[in-house]
């Protein structure tokens, strides 16, 4: 029976919100929902979206379950490993699998996705659940997805970022970004070209990705999603894209004597993946079958036009904007693009992208379409409202004049089911005569205006489900013509130069590296001009200073009453409704500030002075060199490091620090204008939890004895900060060799298997090195090596914490587990996990691998020394 509500949830009457919509989705056993909708059929037959002879194949594909598709994250050290694992392990392993007497097709590469990084798996859900081989593969996908090495994403949803052609120096705006699957691709693109080669990763590119969504809850989902792919170059904002604010940023010319100026931020690349009716996703969101009406697309057209026009205003000359929807409806697609092209006259044009992604099967954009603006009987040109017509006899727009709103009555396909008539209205002028009220609420741009061929709407890209077993999708690439050489340059390099100049002016001496900085520190893949770092962190993990779950008593709490702040606040740019995010820490409650008529409740974004003692201790301990110290950021009103230190790229800093003095606790204006929710990544976490607050008063549940024990331990630390695993990929080039510990694959196996091993139990040179080192944060550099028949082909780095008596690999359970599956074909971190089906064909009969056998004797996590563990405080 029909299941779920599956209502559209965008702005207006439709509203594609993103890849996963919950209620209406297809879930294996529950596919009995009625997958017919006569109006849908009549409408699209009337539009002639596919040639008549393809209609049955089209409908059949629309009703079939959607295959699973995923991408391997590019540029990560894991990319090569995963591609090798797919080709050398999983493909042979999943070939020739039989399930209930039938051969099951193994995964295959998406032929149009670059570098073989996109994959397609067309098996039924019950095969994934019940076949041991596919179940094991599913487990692999889940693990790798959790840690950001793989992204499960609908195939067609991968297209817009590919058409956008993003490069590392680009300032990119993703206008409607939540839940963020395309944002992830954009982030990958600025950090590396699409490749599985690990060396291609640039930790600090010049570019920026600004990801926005007007729905506050969804924008917070975006923040959460982005943490799978930590980037110092990402900002998340929460405003209405149709009135996205102008912001000023500092900019400096290449001449060393040039002054720092203010420039309006213009983007090199913009993605407008707008809210839409989403009927291209019917294969996945089957509830849309029931809810589909002609009004869904009509209701969204105006918002879509406004978003696209705003996007094009924010685009720099020479820049590219991709407009996309997962709707098949021309009023949400070609009509919107045509409206924007007319608005900009000759300044914007459609790009012919027929040469891009040559293996992608596609259709040209429509240059003729019909409009059904409403449902009322008065909109039918005759009184034949009950008369039915068959789809097969209706003329397509290419064959018929768009004025032809009467259905042919000479039905030549008597056996075909009759479909309802659609109340097409031939033009806006006709609508005015039929229903002035409705006309006053709709736009003329819904209808073709006769210039569609001159606008080259055929350059738009349409993808239909039956062409290559995907969802339906629409993409248009628009470029703003280059008129003035100055305007047509990317601003990124100038923004970075401005930040460097500001740093030089403010404190040249504090930019020196610490005394431990070694002359031969490795520094790879870094553009001289891009200097930033970050590391988000959401996961709790245990380290080894104390075993108590010490929670700081909100040292960042500031008691600024809303009214105090609000009295200072002046309304800024229009912004969407802001609700306090559900996961927001309670201490932000007093910080609401008025922005665009609604409340902005974020903690401030404050860059820390580079002579701050905590910052200096990090610089010294980690031997940071050539590092943009001025880009270290905190999120508290005191503007000093308390628990976490974040890093942003210089270009992000130019945005965050711009716009002039802010209001209330916010140091600068741009974050308020943009309703900035998040930027940068966490790079350092405070390793001990003794704050001023709990020095004065024991934290909840803690005794004064335990507090004093922690204080004693803390006082032994040279640096109380640890480098965070999520950001290590970016931080590694800046770290001194002094804190690097070289290790092999078998050392890594030891640390995955043993939680908080005592120092004396750590074997080999790594143990020796750790025993002779002082307490603090180190990095384990795992070099390519072999262990027990397993091979590591690329270098890996992980943070490690050396405590008084024990040591710990700073990865949480999930990450350890994913890493272990990937490297050792089993979960060394979990004795239960070792009973999982093995992916390795050698071990199909549940034989344990050599690695498993060698570790199973002591796979139980060590019980931790209660005096030497701590909970990460974020
Ligand atoms: C199709 S979804 C975006 C999917 C996303 N690009 C992805 O790949 O994950 C459309 C998004 O637009 C957002 N939205 C709706 N109206 C908006 C507006 N006026 N400004 C900005 N975002 C809007 C919705 O909240 C929704 O998250």
Image: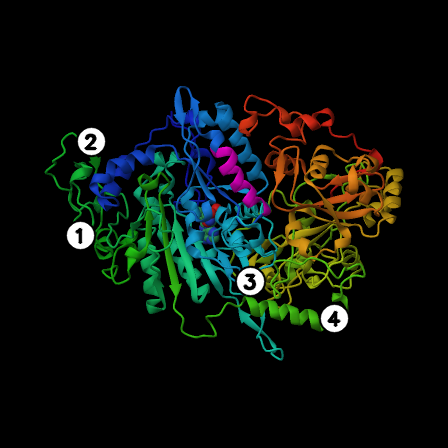
Vertical placement of 855 versus 325: above or below?
A: above
Label 4 sits on residue: 508
Q: Nearer the viewer, mark 3 or mark 1?
A: 1
Measure the C-alpha gap from mark 3 to mark 2.
56 Å
Dot 3 crowding, Cα within 10 Å, few <14, some 14–19, many 20+: some
Label 1, secondary structure: give it: loop
Q: Nearer the viewer, mark 4 or mark 2?
A: 4
Q: Nearer the viewer, mark 4 or mark 3?
A: 4
Label 3 sits on residue: 572
Q: Would you say 59 lies left or right of 839 here?
A: left
Q: Which region shows up in magenta?
A: 77-91
Measure the C-alpha gap from mark 4 to mark 3.
36 Å
Measure the C-alpha gap from mark 2 to mark 1.
25 Å
Label 4, secondary structure: give it: loop
Query: Toward the viewer: 618 or 769?
Result: 769
Vertical placement of 253 versus 519: above or below?
A: below
Q: Is residue 440 part of the magenta span, yes or no?
A: no
Q: Which mark is residue 417?
A: 2
Label 1 sits on residue: 403
């Amino acid at each position: 029976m029909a299941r779920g509500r599956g209502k559209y949830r965008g702005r207006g009457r439709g509203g594609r919100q993103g890849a996963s919509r919950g209620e209406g989705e297809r879930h294996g056993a529950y596919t009995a929902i009625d997958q017919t909708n006569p109006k849908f059929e009549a409408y699209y037959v009337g539009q002639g979206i596919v040639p008549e002879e393809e209609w049955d194949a089209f409908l059949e594909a629309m009703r079939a379950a959607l295959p699973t598709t995923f991408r391997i994250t590019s540029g990560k050290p894991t990319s090569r490993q995963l591609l090798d694992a797919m080709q050398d392990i999983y493909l042979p392993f999943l070939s020739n699998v039989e399930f209930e007497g039938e051969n099951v097709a193994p995964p295959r590469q998406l032929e149009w996705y670059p570098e073989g990084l996109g994959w397609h798996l067309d098996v039924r859900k019950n095969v994934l659940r019940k076949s041991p081989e596919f179940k094991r593969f599913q487990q692999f996908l889940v693990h790798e997805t959790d840690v950001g090495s793989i992204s499960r994403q609908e195939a067609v949803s991968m297209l817009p970022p590919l058409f956008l052609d993003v490069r590392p120096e680009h300032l990119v705006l993703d206008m409607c970004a939540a839940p963020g699957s395309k944002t992830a691709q954009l982030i990958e693109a600025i950090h590396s070209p699409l490749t599985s080669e690990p060396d291609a990763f640039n930790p600090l590119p010049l570019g920026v990705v600004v990801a926005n969504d007007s729905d506050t809850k969804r924008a917070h989902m975006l923040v959460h999603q982005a943490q799978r792919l930590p980037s110092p170059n990402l900002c998340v904002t929460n405003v209405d894209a149709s009135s996205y604010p102008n912001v000023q940023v500092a900019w400096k010319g290449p001449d060393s004597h040039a002054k720092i100026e203010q420039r309006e931020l213009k983007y090199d690349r913009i993605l407008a993946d707008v809210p839409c009716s989403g009927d291209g996703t019917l294969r996945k969101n089957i509830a849309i079958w029931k809810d589909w009406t002609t009004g869904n697309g009509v209701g969204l057209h105006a918002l879509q036009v406004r978003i696209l026009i705003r996007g094009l205003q924010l685009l720099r000359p020479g820049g590219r904007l991709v407009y996309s929807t997962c709707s098949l409806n021309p009023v949400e697609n070609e009509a919107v693009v045509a409206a924007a092209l007319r608005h900009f006259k000759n300044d914007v044009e459609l790009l012919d992208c027929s040469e891009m992604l040559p293996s992608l099967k596609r259709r040209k954009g429509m240059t003729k379409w019909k409009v059904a603006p409403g449902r009322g009987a008065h909109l039918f040109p005759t009184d034949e409202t009950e008369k039915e017509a068959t789809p097969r006899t209706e003329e397509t727009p290419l064959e018929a004049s768009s004025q032809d709103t009467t259905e042919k009555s000479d039905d030549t396909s008597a056996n075909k089911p009759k479909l309802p008539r659609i109340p097409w209205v031939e033009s806006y002028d006709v609508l005015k005569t039929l229903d002035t009220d409705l006309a006053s609420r709709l736009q003329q741009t819904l209808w073709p205006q006769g210039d569609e061929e001159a606008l080259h709407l055929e350059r738009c890209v349409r993808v239909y489900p039956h062409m290559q077993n995907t969802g339906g999708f629409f993409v248009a690439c628009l470029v703003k013509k280059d008129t003035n050489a100055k305007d047509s340059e990317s601003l990124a390099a100038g923004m970075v130069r401005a930040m460097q100049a500001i740093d030089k002016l403010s404190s040249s001496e504090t930019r020196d590296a610490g005394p431990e900085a070694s002359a031969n520190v490795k520094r790879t893949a870094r553009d001289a001009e891009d200097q930033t770092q970050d590391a988000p962190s959401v996961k709790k993990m245990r380290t080894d200073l104390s075993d108590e779950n010490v929670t700081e008593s909100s040292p960042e709490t500031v008691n600024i009453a809303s009214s105090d702040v609000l009295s200072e606040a002046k309304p800024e740019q229009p912004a969407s409704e802001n609700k306090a995010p559900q996961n927001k820490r309670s201490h932000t409650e007093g910080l609401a500030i008025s922005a665009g008529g609604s409340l902005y409740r974020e903690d401030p974004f404050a860059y820390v002075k580079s002579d701050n003692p905590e910052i200096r201790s990090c610089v010294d301990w980690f031997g940071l060199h050539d590092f943009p110290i001025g880009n270290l950021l905190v999120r508290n009103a005191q503007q000093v490091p308390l628990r976490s230190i974040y890093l942003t790229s210089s270009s992000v800093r130019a945005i965050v620090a711009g716009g002039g003095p802010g209001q209330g606790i916010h140091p600068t204006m741009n974050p308020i204008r943009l309703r900035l929710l998040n930027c940068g990544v966490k790079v350092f976490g405070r390793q001990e939890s003794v704050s001023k607050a709990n020095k004065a008063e024991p934290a909840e549940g803690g005794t004064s004895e335990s507090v004093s024990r922690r204080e004693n331990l803390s006082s032994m630390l040279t640096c109380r900060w640890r480098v965070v695993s999520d950001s290590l990929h970016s931080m590694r080039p800046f770290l001194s060799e002094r804190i690097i510990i070289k290790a092999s694959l078998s050392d890594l196996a030891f640390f995955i298997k043993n939680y908080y091993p005592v120092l004396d139990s750590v074997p080999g040179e790594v143990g020796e090195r750790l025993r002779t080192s002082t307490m603090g944060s180190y990095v384990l550099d795992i070099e390519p090596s072999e262990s027990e028949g397993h091979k590591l082909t690329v270098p890996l780095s992980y943070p490690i914490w050396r405590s008084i008596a024990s040591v710990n690999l700073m990865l949480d359970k999930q990450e350890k587990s994913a890493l272990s599956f990937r490297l050792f074909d089993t979960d060394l971190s979990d004795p239960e996990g070792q009973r999982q089906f093995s992916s390795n064909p050698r071990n199909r009969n549940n034989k344990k691998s050599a690695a498993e056998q060698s570790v199973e004797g002591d796979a139980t996590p060590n019980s931790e020394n209660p005096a030497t563990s701590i909970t990460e405080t974020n």
